Amino acid sequence: MTEISFWTSPPDRMTRGSGCRYNITVVQPPFEVRAEDLPPHDPAAARAFAETFPTVDAVLEELEPVAACANPYLATRADLDVIQVGCWGNVTAISDPAMADNGNDTPLWYEVNRLHERFPEARIVGRVEVDCGESHTEDIIRLPGGPVFHASGWPTMDPWELTGDPRAVAAALGIGADVLQEHDLDFDADPGDVEWADFATLALGEADPWPMSSLTTSVFRVRHTESATRTMEELYFLGG
């Protein structure tokens, strides 16, 4: 089974552009948790989460664990097969280059909604940025039983895809106008001028695990699904 590959590109083929962020964080109640107070990482739970994640066809190999902040650099096709998963008590997070997109699809939107079906009481935040000459971003905040906000597009370029009301999400999170102003978040501005990733980061608050050097994540080499592989091949390699 492990010899099967959906790639048409060799492992050493150089990628074009790079993905500097492609993560989803699932926070189950209680939401007022600080990342530095989270319990130790659970490798078994991380593997189970990776094996059931919709972009993953199979986990092929477990690599050495790394800190949450150690986002792998994408240089070759082989790097696209590597994902990070962290499970720390009520916080679960995954970093997977298959969630990046250039605007032709919205994989982050699909994966967050699937996770919402699995964890309806969770606060789920996704953040993706991929650089293909210019950065394309996709950010989503999904609250339990409440509003959702999703933004996808190229900064300084139209059109932008926006779903939901960021004001309603901010209100539900208790994020006041003063905090938004402090972070230069003006929802009346042109969508391409708003740092939506900063808004997503605010939604995680102190529970955000990704800047932490003290939190350990499991690292897996995986075979992505055929559809996820095809999407990555079109995104990261000129001419497919």
Image (cartoon, rainbow, N blue to C red):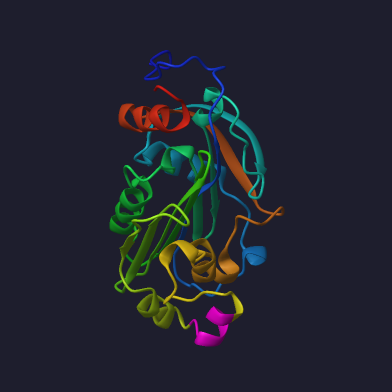
Q: Is residue 199 above or below residue 77?
A: below
Q: Is residue 104 left or right of residue 40?
A: left
Pick the quarter of the image with the C terminus: top left
Q: Which residues are magenta?
A: 175-181
Pick the quarter of the image with the N terminus: top left
Residue 232 colored in magenta in the image: no
Write the residue at 61% across / 62% down. 38
Write the residue at 50% across / 29% down. 81
Camera-nearest residue between 126 and 130: 130
Q: Quadrant of residue 223?
A: top left
Q: Is residue 71 above or below residue 175?
A: above
The kind of secondary structure the magenta stretch mainly shows is: helix
Inspect this view and state whether residue 23 appears.
no
Q: Position of residue 78 (x, y in %)?
A: 54, 23
Number of numbered discs overlaid on the protein picture: 0
Q: Position of residue 70 (x, y in %)?
A: 66, 44
Residue at the far right: name it. 214
Inspect this view and state whether residue 86 appears.
yes
Camera-nearest residue between 64 and 181: 181
Residue 179 colored in magenta in the image: yes
Q: Position of residue 193 (x, y in %)?
A: 49, 65
